[in-house]
Amino acid sequence: MIANFFNTTKPFNILVVIAILALIYSASSFYSMDVNLDFIILSKKVLFFLILLLTFFIVNFIIRKNGLSKDNSYVLFLMVLFFGMFPLSTTNYLLIITNVILLFAYRRIYSLRTNKDINEKIFDGAFWVGIATIVYPWCFLFLFLVYAAISTFKKATLRNVIIPLIGFLTPILIFGVFLFISDDFDNYNWQLNYNFSFLDYNSLRMLVPITIIIGFLLWTILPTTIKISSVNNEFKTSWLLVLFHLLVSVIIVLTSIDKNGSEFIFMFFPTAIIFTNYLEIEKEKWFKDVFLYLFLAVTISIYLL
């Protein structure tokens, strides 16, 4: 039933996804609040909900424009559930902003599959990655995603190898000049801080969603890759880019200083695409329902544990 419902992209389906997102955001926000609610706090939360909502419209645009999934709402529904599984991802405003910036980069990176405005797309993609790096330094790893796209979509030329570096460094140099002029250069943290301690994951609220997501990634990647590779279409190259995207995202999650679940926001986009493509090739309707109901059940359980 649930699989059939989200198997289309009708306006009502999108409204349902938005309603679930609003419910999850409200539950996450007010559950984590330790201060009295006032107009300023409420306004801030409404603003960031709108920013969070923007991410879903950008994601929908990217997957439709680049054919990363068929005409369904699985990606959006799964991303909402991911936010629900990791409640702090909806209240970590720094990462929400970083994620939006990266989505603008993904929009240009994945569109390299076409032969239109190649140089501009490469520059723009790297430029947005540069901005994201200013906000969250480990985002510099997504520069490799730009080069992966150049290689995967066979756009490798000497110019196209140099352009990403120029695009990436442009916002960083501008920001550096701004800090220097404002005499604030020494106060900015340029270090790549990391934390490889995973003790914070030793709670049911963290272990359950992490285990479910990792388990199903291991379950779905190989058969989906084999199925997609057996079909002679251009999506094969995009699929390889999605897998590399997931790898970069996993590295950023592993290095994250704060292991509170919000860091998994970097994995939401590629993981939702991988799961969606698996559901699209899965012929057993009952299994699709079980798959989605399980993720929904895990999301609900997070607020009951």
Image (cartoon, rainbow, N blue to C red):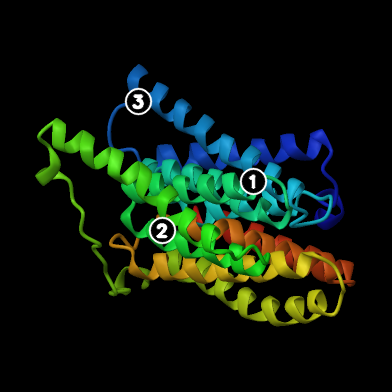
| Residue in the picture at 62% in, 74% down | 217
Q: In the image, which disc is placed on residue 263? A: 2
Q: Residue furthest top?
A: 39
Q: Which residue is mark 3?
A: 41
Percent x, y of residue 132: 40, 47
| Residue in the picture at 35% in, 50% down | 169
Q: Nearer the viewer, mark 1 or mark 3?
A: 1
Left or right: residue 196 versus residue 158 is: left
Give the amino acid type for the residue marked by disc 2 in the picture: Glu
Badge 1 local density, few (<14 within 10 Å), some, or many (20+)? many
Q: In the image, which disc is placed on residue 59? A: 1
Mark 3 lies on a secondary structure that is helix
Seen from the viewer's position, the closer of residues 217 and 117 is 117
Badge 3 local density, few (<14 within 10 Å), some, or many (20+)? few
Mark 1 or mark 2, which has the lower sequence index?
Answer: 1
Percent x, y of residue 280: 83, 64
Mark 1 lies on a secondary structure that is helix
Mark 2 or mark 3, which has the lower sequence index?
Answer: 3
The quadrant where residue 227 appears? bottom right
Give the amino acid type for the residue marked by disc 3 in the picture: Ile
Q: Are marks 2 and 3 in contact (CB under 8 Å)?
A: no
Seen from the viewer's position, the closer of residues 288 and 264 is 264
Residue 301 appears in the rendering = no
Left or right: residue 20 versus residue 143 is: right
User: Against 24, is 255 above or below?
Assistant: below
Give the Cα distance between marks 2 and 3.
23 Å
Q: Nearer the viewer, mark 1 or mark 2?
A: 1
Give the Cα distance between marks 1 and 2.
18 Å
Mark 2 lies on a secondary structure that is helix
